[in-house]
Amino acid sequence: MTLRSPRYNFTIPAGTISAGGSYLIELEKNEKYAENAPYNDVLIRNFSGQRIKVSYGDTMQIMGASEVMHDTEAYGTRRIIIKNSDTTVGNDDIIFVMVSRNITADHCIISDKTGENIYTIASGGV
């Protein structure tokens, strides 16, 4: 296990999330991504014309059509659920998701001052 993870990209194709439907990106239970879970950095680009509800860790965001959201404090992200809030049409364009675990200068300072393990801090444990 390393402190930083690779950036993992997911592209949800147009038409994948039906009206009112959901899409799950399971990070902790998928062998390819489990070793680096939990993640603390989430980027979502909603290229579709639909409003979506995005849930991960302890966060829930509503994103409008063609909106971008970047959360650099997405501590404890083990899975991402994207729900299409539109009641009549599926996503009409792609939704791009990127996750990673990063170590910041703030994490290093907190670790230095508290003596806490930096991995615990980067995972949101302090």
Image (cartoon, helix red, strand yellow):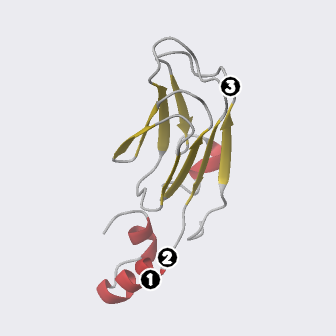
**SS type, badge 1:** helix
* Dots 3, 2 in contact, CB < 8 A: no
| Residue behind mark 2 | 104
Which dot, 1 or 3, sits closer to the camera? 3
Identify the residue at image location x=39%, y=42%: 61
Is 121 situated left or right of 16 in this image? left
Question: Of label 1 and label 3, which has the lower sequence position?
Answer: 3
In the image, residue 95 lies at what x, y percent? 62, 36
Which dot, 3 or 2, sits closer to the camera? 3
Tell me the quarter of the image containing the C terminus: bottom left
Residue 51 vertical placement versus 120 (above, below): above
Is 123 situated left or right of 12 in this image? left
Crowdedness near tag 2: few (<14), some (14–19) or many (≥20) residues, C-alpha within 10 Å: few
Mark 1–mark 3 Cα distance, whole angstroms, equals: 40 Å
Please state which amino acid type lies under the numbered disc 3.
Answer: Ala
Is 44 situated left or right of 61 in this image? right
In front: 73, or 93? 93
* Dots 1, 3 in contact, CB < 8 A: no
Identify the residue at image location x=35%, y=81%: 110
| Residue behind mark 1 | 108
In the image, residue 87 lies at what x, y percent? 45, 14
**SS type, badge 2:** loop
The numbered disc on residue 30 is none
In the image, residue 56 lies at what x, y percent? 42, 44
